[in-house]
Image (cartoon, rainbow, N blue to C red):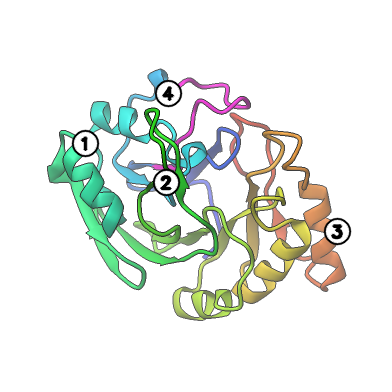
Amino acid sequence: MALDGSTTITWYGHSCWEVRTPGGKTILLDPWFGNPSSPRPAAAVDGCDLMLVSHGHSDHFGDALMIASRTRPIWPSIHELSLWLGRNYAHKDGLIGMNKGGTVEVAGLKVSMVRADHSAGDMYSGSESPLYLGEPIGFIVELENGFRFYFAGDTDVFSDMRLIGERYRPSLAFLPIGGHFTMDPTAAAMAVEFLGVTDVAPMHYGTFPLLAGTPDQLRAALAERGLGNVTVHSTSPGGTLG
């Protein structure tokens, strides 16, 4: 199923996205609204029905706890993160602990958890060692109209993306392209081929000089692989995908 006007997808820089679904739900993905590219502060976020955080690095976990405390979303998370949230988040009734391979139905949506190839520890509150909030993961989300997207979080390309594509058949993939900490545009083009998607939304680029990959480089890498028909949906922070 192709992306259509019944779904609004807004990028707020880095890997921070807001998806408004055909059924009127608001999904926040890796909500670091405090990133230097975001035109919207976290304090201005007044609605979230479904919170999805791919891993515990501060540039992804970011403002999730503050926003969730105000909006009280359903929050499916990997088991270890759900345990930590159970001690540090007041609205425990919205938490759903799960793991890779699992699928839950919430708010009229289906959320499946898949693997990612990255790390997940970060320093918080002056700690002497990193806080690990479970392994990094990605998500497959199926909207009310059957449209499915894959949110990869931070990852390198890995061959099991073929299995993700075969099992879940997503149409759109949100993929990091910046390089250095994640895959670059060349690897992301390989991921697109593995997944079999027709549309890709690049992310995790341009926030800092180290994240040097660009959407145009992704387009060129796709063309080199004979995938010039894949649509790369790029926009400025605060813009929507078209």
Which amino acid lies under the numbered mark 1 shown in the image of this protein? Asn
Q: Secondary structure at mark 4?
A: helix
The residue identified by callout 4 is 42
Label 1 CA crowd tier, 10 Å (few <14, some 14–19, many 20+): few
Near-viewer residue (21 or 48): 48
Q: Quadrant of residue 172?
A: bottom right
Q: Would you say 201 lies left or right of 190 here? A: left
In primary-sequence order, the first of circles 1 and 2 is 2
Q: Are marks 1 and 3 in contact (CB under 8 Å)?
A: no
Residue 137 in view here: yes
Near-viewer residue (166 or 7): 166
Q: Would you say 43 lies left or right of 152 here? A: left
Instruction: Give the magenta part as a residue range.
Output: 28-41
Is the magenta region chiefly helix, strand or loop?
loop
In primary-sequence order, the first of circles 1 and 4 is 4
Q: Which numbered disc, 4 or 2, marks the residue closer to the eye?
A: 2
The residue identified by callout 3 is 220
In primary-sequence order, the first of circles 4 and 2 is 4
Near-viewer residue (156 or 105): 156
> Looking at the rendered structure, which numbered label has been put on residue 56?
2
Residue 76 in view here: no
Percent coordinates x, y for residue 105 in the rendering: 24, 61
Label 3 CA crowd tier, 10 Å (few <14, some 14–19, many 20+): some
Residue drawn at x 77%, y 47% is 213
Q: Which numbered disc, 2 or 3, marks the residue closer to the eye?
A: 2
Q: Secondary structure at mark 2?
A: loop
